[in-house]
């Protein structure tokens, strides 16, 4: 039996290995989405595919990696996986993501015994899907690009050129696509090498015992956290703007959350069925997003291990938007980014002191592509935008930070985008008055305005623009996200998710939403409101209207007499209703 000190040393060695995998990936990837944004999921897993160490990136990727490895084991069998093999999987229903988020993984052997896996998932740029960049309106998986069902990129350490040739001839951007996949391979090989070194240093049995103990301890921590939660059943519904095909129809997401002494059940029964467009989720991603919320409530301060999720049970209906089955389209995975806050909305009914109000609710991604006149070569660059976070029982929401589904991620810097593409960032800053009013204010969103200097396509991946971020305990709702094309001109268009063909000189503004407020806005400390006005988060007019606070515009101080009158009038009006 492995002693506790050795287990802890091995645990940290595995975490260090996962971090080295991430550093290797970022040094070798061709794609700024990977090395600038950290759009990746990385794990070291045991022989069953259960994660024992990860490097934070896209939170829902890591649990999806578990699911994909387990499906590959079912498909191929462990005996078919040999030392030096490296596999790629992007069949959505197994891989837990769309075709451009392939999972690359490598078995780890010690003297021909399978002891684990190293995994790396990233977003690559093109696999001959029907539209360049991103697909917003597919109706069948066959429109979503080349599908690879756990095939070998390397066999016993030798490159499988047949598969690489197939990939190369099924990509509009073959050099960058192959380069990124090879970066995944290199990253996984690093994970294999470091894990084998741990096995040699401490012994195979010690490593395998430590992996078991790591997950057993992770489960114990999760059950301790679960025991502290209020018990009950709560249901909430929210909506995705559309499925990309039926553009006027909101798509319903319904979560019923039950917390007992033994488990948390997240039941997605009642969510929309027969969704034609590509917002359907592979079941592994539904499990992953549900896991993210569960971990945030039970074990937020410890690294991710599979044992953390033993007390979680996820229920889905095959054929629904939360459980895609072949050949349902899955390319636009934004449902998985929005759905986590549906779980929080349900929990807010039973434990409002433990969860925040809704954030801006979306990742708000903009992708540009075309031909760069400076080089004559195709270009494709993307970035996700920050949103305002929801307020909590005792704190304002954070202003302009990455959505809760990607806590390890960043956005693409202005300098990188302008260097690598024919775009100029005309302005970039906070959106005043977007955070919901409350005793504690929702965080504000941001606005980034792009001016294209050559004809281009601007793809907007924003799917919470038609519903507002919800609040708690009488707070105000946040302002929703929106995309503005050619703002301030007679050609202005305000919209959400869209595929836009833009001429040189045209602009696109990505304006993100604010978080919901918490508590009665008229009980907010007037000095805090004045501070928000001074800092540009709240306008003087909104301070009067939403908070009943008069702020002197010259000194940004509170006009006590005018504020008392405003709040008294508000109380009288409320009493008369």
Image (spheres, helix red, strand yellow):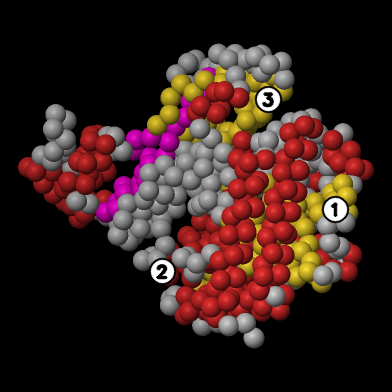
Front position among marks 3 and 2: 3
User: Seen in the image, is 211 located left or right of residue 71?
Assistant: left
Q: Label 2 to label 1, Cα distance in Å?
A: 52 Å
Q: Earlier in the sequence, mark 2 or mark 1?
A: 1
The reply to whether residue 478 is in sight is no
Write down the residue under mark 3: 379
Image height of 376 relative to 318, above or below = above
Q: Residue at x 51, y 27 (%)?
A: 415
CB-based contact (under 8 Å), mark 2 and mark 1: no
On residue 113, the disc is none
User: Seen in the image, is 454 located left or right of residue 359?
Assistant: right
Q: Which residue occupies the extreme left position in the image?
A: 561
Front position among marks 1 and 3: 1
Write down the residue under mark 2: 351
Q: Residues within 10 Å of mark 1 (few under 14, many from 20)?
A: few
**Residue 59 falls in image quadrant:** bottom right
Q: Position of residue 350 (x, y in %)?
A: 43, 70
Q: Label 3 to label 2, Cα distance in Å?
A: 47 Å
Q: Residue at x 70, y 54 (%)?
A: 190
Front position among marks 2 and 1: 1
Q: Label 1 to label 3, Cα distance in Å?
A: 33 Å
Write down the residue under mark 1: 157
The span shown in magenta is 430-451
Report the magenta stretch's main SS: loop
- Circle 3: element type: strand
Q: Residue at x 46, y 21 (%)?
A: 426
Q: Residues within 10 Å of mark 2 (few under 14, many from 20)?
A: some
- Circle 2: element type: loop
Closest to the observer, 202 or 437: 202
Q: Residue at x 88, y 50 (%)?
A: 158
Q: Which residue occupies the extreme bottom position in the image?
A: 1
């Amino acid at each position: 039996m492995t002693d506790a000190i050795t287990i802890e040393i091995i645990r940290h060695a595995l975490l260090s290995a996962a971090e080295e995998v991430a550093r290797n990936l970022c040094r070798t990837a061709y794609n700024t989405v990977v090395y600038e944004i950290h759009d990746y999921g990385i794990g070291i897993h045991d022989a069953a595919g259960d994660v024992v160490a990860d490097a934070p990136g896209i939170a829902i990727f890591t649990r999806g990696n578990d699911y994909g490895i387990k499906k590959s084991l079912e498909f191929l069998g462990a005996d078919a996986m040999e030392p030096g093999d490296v596999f790629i999987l992007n069949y959505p229903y197994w891989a837990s993501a769309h075709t451009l988020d392939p999972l690359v993984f490598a078995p780890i052997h010690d003297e021909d015994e399978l002891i684990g896996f190293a995994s790396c998932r990233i977003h690559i740029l093109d696999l001959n899907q029907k539209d360049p960049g991103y697909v917003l309106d597919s109706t069948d998986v066959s429109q979503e690009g080349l599908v690879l069902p756990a095939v070998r990129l390397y066999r016993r350490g030798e490159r499988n050129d047949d598969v690489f040739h197939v990939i190369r001839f099924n990509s509009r951007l073959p050099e960058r696509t192959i380069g990124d996949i090879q970066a995944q391979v290199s990253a996984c090989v690093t994970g294999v090498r470091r894990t084998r070194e741990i096995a040699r240093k401490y012994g195979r049995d010690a490593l395998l015992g430590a992996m078991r103990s790591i997950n057993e301890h992770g489960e114990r921590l999760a059950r301790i956290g679960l025991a502290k939660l209020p018990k009950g059943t709560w249901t909430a519904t929210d909506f995705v703007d559309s499925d990309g095909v039926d553009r006027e129809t909101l798509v319903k997401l319904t979560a019923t959350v039950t917390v007992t002494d033994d488990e948390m059940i997240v039941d997605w029964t009642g969510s929309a069925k027969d969704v034609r467009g590509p917002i359907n989720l592979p079941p592994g991603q539904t499990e992953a997003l549900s896991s993210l919320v569960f971990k945030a409530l039970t074990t937020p301060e410890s690294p991710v291990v599979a044992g953390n999720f033993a007390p979680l049970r996820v229920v889905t209906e095959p054929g629904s938007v939360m459980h895609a089955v072949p050949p349902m389209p899955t390319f636009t995975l934004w449902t998985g980014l929005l759905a986590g806050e549906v779980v929080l909305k349900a929990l807010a009914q039973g434990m409002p002191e433990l969860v925040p109000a809704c954030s801006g609710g979306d990742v708000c991604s903009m992708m540009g592509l075309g031909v760069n006149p400076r080089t004559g070569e195709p270009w494709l660059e993307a970035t996700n935008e920050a949103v305002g976070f929801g307020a909590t029982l005792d704190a304002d929401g954070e202003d302009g930070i990455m959505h809760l589904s990607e806590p390890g991620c960043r956005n693409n810097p202005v300098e990188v985008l302008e260097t690598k593409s024919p775009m100029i960032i005309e302005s970039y800053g906070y959106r005043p008055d977007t955070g919901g009013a409350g005793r504690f204010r929702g965080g504000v969103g941001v606005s980034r305005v792009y001016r294209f200097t050559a004809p281009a396509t601007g793809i907007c991946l924003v799917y919470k623009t038609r519903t507002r971020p919800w609040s708690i305990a009488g707070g105000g709702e946040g302002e929703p996200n929106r995309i503005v094309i050619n703002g301030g001109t007679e050609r202005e268009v305000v919209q959400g998710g869209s595929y836009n063909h833009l001429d040189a000189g045209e602009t696109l503004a990505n304006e993100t939403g604010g978080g919901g407020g918490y508590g009665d806005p008229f009980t907010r400390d007037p000095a805090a409101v004045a501070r928000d006005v001074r800092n540009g988060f709240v306008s003087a007019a909104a301070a009067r209207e939403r908070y009943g606070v008069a702020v002197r515009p010259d000194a940004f101080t509170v006009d006590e007499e005018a504020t008392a009158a405003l709040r008294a009038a508000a109380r009288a009006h409320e009493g008369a209703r």
